[in-house]
Image (spheres, rainbow, N blue to C red):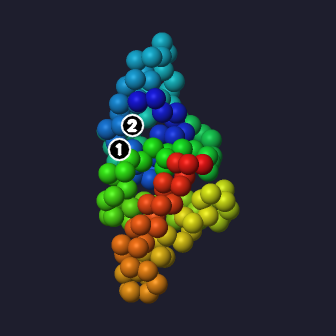
Amino acid sequence: MNKSSQKLKMGFRLGIYTKEEVIDWVVVEIDQSDEPSEKLLDLSFATTKGVHDIYSALCDLDGSPEEDDVLIEVLTDLEDQVIDNIEFCRDLAIKLYSYYIDKNYEVDQRLTEIGYFDDGYDLALRGIGETIDEWHTRFKRFLNELKNC
């Protein structure tokens, strides 16, 4: 796994990377370092705790703000079989909307749609506008178009 700490942080926040992937990354980073940083060691201890502790430790490790380019890079790593899972996509849409809010509704123009998928799903559930399958198709198309950017 060759991920930057920033990419790992973003992917973990979105539920794309798992706790196990974070642990694997930490082990490799510690093994490759003669003197691992205190923050890296803190992250290794956080992996024995909950999701919020891990994310907080990832934020402390990286320290840089989350960026749209990293988000796009993480989203382009998603494989087709993962995005074919509508429950995964629904959860991802919710987390992308949280990211959108955290960025004060100002994201790269390639990401503008993340502000609408959460509401679009809720409307589709009520039979307003598109169906759930149409929503899912639109969400998958959005993710696949990012791969072509």
Q: Is residue 134 above or below residue 5?
A: below
Type of the residue with mark 1: Thr
Type of the residue with mark 2: Val
| Percent x, y of residue 14 | 44, 53
Label pair 1/2, CB-CB below 8 angstroms = yes
Q: Secondary structure at mark 1?
A: loop
Residue with the mark numbered 1: 18
| Percent x, y of residue 112 | 61, 64
Q: Is residue 135 left or right of residue 146?
A: left
**Camera-nearest residue between 76 and 103:** 76
In the image as oriented, which residue stretches furthest toward the top? 34
**Gap in angstroms between the C-alphas marked 1 and 2:** 6 Å
Q: Is residue 92 above or below residue 129?
A: above
Q: Which mark is residue 74?
A: none
| Percent x, y of residue 126 | 38, 86
Q: Is residue 99 above or below residue 9?
A: below
Residue at image position (37%, 75%) is 132
Residue at image position (52%, 48%) is 147
Residue at image position (47%, 71%) is 118
Q: Is residue 97 left or right of residue 80?
A: right
**Camera-nearest residue between 144 and 28:** 144
Residue with the mark numbered 2: 22
| Percent x, y of residue 90 | 39, 66
